[in-house]
């Protein structure tokens, strides 16, 4: 009966350690031992600082998993971070035709390349769809820019 009581080790975090050890032992006894050969994937690390654009606000990056498509989605959002300032100006000043010409230029090539594999990955459907809308002359607007911002911040 005394073994079932929780022993407190004063000031040393003994409760947390005792509980964690007890839970690990219980999980192992039930067949749920943690696997050290396949750790959970980490998160991809952004290489740019998200920008702030007056009409759009500050861009934030969500927690992108360090998988091939997760990293690709982060790269697309990083490309977007570098283009959104000029984008906000152009969607208010240019015609749909002028926007299509700009989207066809080399400045957008990397972003389109980064989006290519995301189109078939349902986990990144929001990012791919928002990017597609934002980069189509007839649909390009501050509203579609905000959709892409949100998709990059929340990650499916």
Image (cartoon, rainbow, N blue to C red):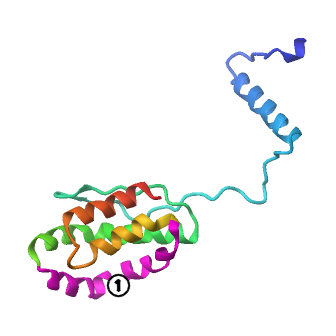
Kindly give the residue lying farthest to the left in the view shown. 93
Up-down relation of residue 114 to residue 154 (above or below): below
Q: Is residue 118 magenta?
A: yes
- Horizontally, is 137 left or right of 9 in the view? left
**Where, quadrant-wise, is the N terminus in this rendering?**
top right
* Main secondary structure along the magenta-highlighted residues: helix
Q: Where residue 14 sits: x, y (%)? A: 73, 23
Q: Where residue 56 sits: x, y (%)? A: 21, 58
- Horizontally, is 117 left or right of 134 in the view? right
**Residue at position x 78%, y 59% from top?**
37
Decide which of 30, 54 is in the foreground and name it.
30
**Residue at position x 34%, y 71% from top?**
131
Q: Is residue 104 magenta?
A: yes
Decide which of 26, 36 is in the foreground and name it.
26
- Horizontally, is 21 left or right of 57 in the view? right
Up-down relation of residue 132 to residue 7 (above or below): below
């Amino acid at each position: 009966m005394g073994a079932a009581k929780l022993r407190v080790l004063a000031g040393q975090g003994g409760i947390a350690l005792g509980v964690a050890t007890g839970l690990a032992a219980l999980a192992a006894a039930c067949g749920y031992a943690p696997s050290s050969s396949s750790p959970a994937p980490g998160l991809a690390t952004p290489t740019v600082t998200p920008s702030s654009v007056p009409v759009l606000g500050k861009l934030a990056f969500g927690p992108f998993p360090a998988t091939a498509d997760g990293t690709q989605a982060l790269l697309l959002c990083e490309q977007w971070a570098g283009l959104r300032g000029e984008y906000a100006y152009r969607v208010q000043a240019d015609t749909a035709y002028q926007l299509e010409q700009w989207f066809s230029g080399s400045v957008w090539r990397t972003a389109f390349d980064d989006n290519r594999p995301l189109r078939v990955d349902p986990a990144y459907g929001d990012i791919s769809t928002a990017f597609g809308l934002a980069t189509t002359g007839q649909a390009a607007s501050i509203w579609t820019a905000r959709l892409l911002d949100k998709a990059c911040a929340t990650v499916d």
